[in-house]
Amino acid sequence: MSKLSNPHRPRHLREVSEHFQGPDLPRNRYGYSADQVWAIKWAMLAAFLGGAMIGAVIMALVLLLTF
């Protein structure tokens, strides 16, 4: 049973959740649709690459300033 269709959840919360979730898409066992999984993967990759670039700039500055 998905979190959205839980009959024990208050009705107004179920309606709000369904409104923001959009159409009833097939979901994985964690409750994410394929579009959400795709967006999360790309966001994690962008965060990793952004952190790597910041680290590379800091290392370059440290090397330039120490030698």
Image (spheres, helix red, strand yellow):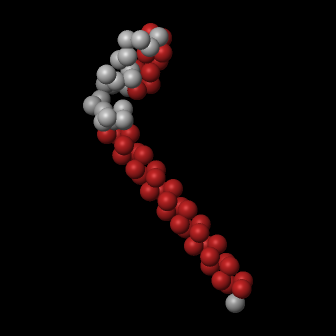
Q: Dividing the picture into quarters, in which one does residue 11 lie?
A: top left
Number of marks drawn: 0
Above or below: residue 40 compared with residue 46: above
Quarter of the image for the N terminus: give it: top left
Q: Position of residue 28 (x, y in %)?
A: 30, 36
Quarter of the image for the C terminus: give it: bottom right
Q: Nearer the viewer, residue 30 or 43?
A: 30
Given the current orientation, which residue lies at the most extreme top position?
A: 11
Q: Position of residue 65 (x, y in %)?
A: 72, 83
Is 24 displayed left or right of 62 in the figure?
Answer: left
Q: Position of residue 9 (x, y in %)?
A: 44, 14
Residue occupying the point 59% across, 66% down:
54
Residue occupying the point 68% across, 79% down:
62
Above or below: residue 28 compared with residue 61: above
Above or below: residue 50 compared with residue 27: below
Q: Position of residue 19 (x, y in %)?
A: 43, 20
Given the current orientation, which residue lies at the most extreme left position?
A: 26
Residue occupying the point 38% across, 21% down:
4
Given the current orientation, which residue lies at the most extreme right position?
A: 65
Is 11 displayed left or right of 35 in the figure?
Answer: right
Given the current orientation, which residue lies at the most extreme bottom position?
A: 67
